[in-house]
Image (cartoon, rainbow, N blue to C red):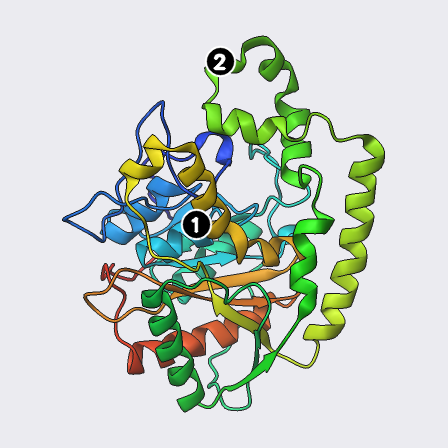
Amino acid sequence: RAAGAAVLGRTNMTEFAVSGVGINPHLGTPRNPCDATLARIPGGSSSGAAGAVALGSAAAALGSDTAGSIRVPAALCGVTGFKSTQSRVPLQGAFPLSHTLDTVCAMAPTVADCLTVDGVISGAPLPVHRRTLAGVRLVLPGTVVLDALEPAVASAFSRALSALSAAGAQVVEEPLPELAEIAAINAPGGLSAVEAWATHRADMQARREAFDPRVAARIALGEPVSAADYLRILQRRRDWIARMQVRLAPFDALVCPTVPITAPAIAPLLASDEAFFRINGLLLRNTIVANFLDGCAFSLPCPARGELPVGLMLVAPGGADARLAEVAWAAEAALAARVGTPACGAPAGA
């Protein structure tokens, strides 16, 4: 408000920010605005936020990103999401999911709009300058992030890479087997489940029936995790981050699809727990990389007009926000010139 924003209201979301799907059984699930013929998920947890920005009802929307809660809905609704390095924006006042992974950030129509909001909420605008993609080195991992891509995503991502290469970027394919370690390091339960259990333990024990059953099931995974197991996860993560920083040092960013699928229909996910958790795992699989890295990331829309939204993600280690933003800004221009405008066509201008 002090910077001149008109705060319109609060949008719906996944209960306690626990899932990448966007379903809320208490208050309803916002419909993805990019398909008028089929009710599709908006992605989560910031589901209504993405819909509002995609429709042009809001110039930007705030949220938190613990495993992809800003970037997943941004990708599925055809807008831009920026997950900054966690330490850029204070967590004070934000209800916690995981104090280790939570990042307060925003989505908006464009990179410039995201940077405007980030500069305000962080109190320290990034020193970002316009540049081209000439000389930019992007690493494309061959491990995990390209698995089981939906054909529409694979096609859009391939076109996007061609556009980036044509604009001067060098895309280098590397195995990066470290990405396959995240699931094992984050077991049992995972950091978000352990820390969410600590937050919700009293209510889970006293009135679990009031929770979204799927959210409760996810939080409950943290109950049996011992303090020793929790500390081991933290230590192994620190070691993993150090190794990943070395692997990523020769590159300006890691590039991959934000999510491996386009937005699925809502109805089958309401009907089936198995389908819900399978899709949730797919939606968060790639985006968790940036959170586990304690890094920063952008999701940029890259479909052609008339296609369902697809996101291209750029990831860099923590503290590299300004450099990454310059690359994302240049990539956005290259995609607009060679690939087309976002599927939902949200107007810019935060």
- The location of residue 290, given as percent across then percent down, is 60, 58
**Which one is in front, 350 or 20?**
20
- The location of residue 159, given as percent across then percent down, is 35, 79
The residue depicted at 66 percent of the width and 51 percent of the height is 183
| Amino acid, disc 1 | Ala
On-image quarter of the C terminus: bottom left
| Amino acid, disc 2 | Glu
- The location of residue 234, given as percent across then percent down, is 78, 46
Sequence-first disc among 2 and 1: 1
Q: Residue furthest top?
A: 206
Where disc 2 sits, the SS reads: helix
Q: Which residue is mark 2?
A: 209
The image's mark for residue 3 is 1
The residue depicted at 53 percent of the width and 24 percent of the height is 216
On-image quarter of the N terminus: top left
Callout 1: 10 Å neighbours few (<14), some, many (20+)? few
> What whole-number distance in Å separates the C-alpha atoms at marks 2 and 1?
42 Å
The residue depicted at 40 percent of the width and 35 percent of the height is 13
Disc 2 to disc 1: CB gap under 8 Å: no
Q: Is residue 52 above or below residue 272?
A: below
Q: Nearer the viewer, mark 2 or mark 1?
A: 2
Callout 2: 10 Å neighbours few (<14), some, many (20+)? few
> Quick check: can you spot residue 157?
yes
Determine whether, in the image, residue 338 is placed left or right of residue 91: left
Determine whether, in the image, residue 223 is placed left or right of residue 296: right
> Quick check: can you spot residue 167?
no
- The location of residue 147, given as percent across then percent down, is 50, 64
The residue depicted at 30 percent of the width and 68 percent of the height is 303
The image's mark for residue 134 is none
In the picture, residue 44 is in which quadrant?
top left
Q: Is residue 127 above or below residue 235?
A: below
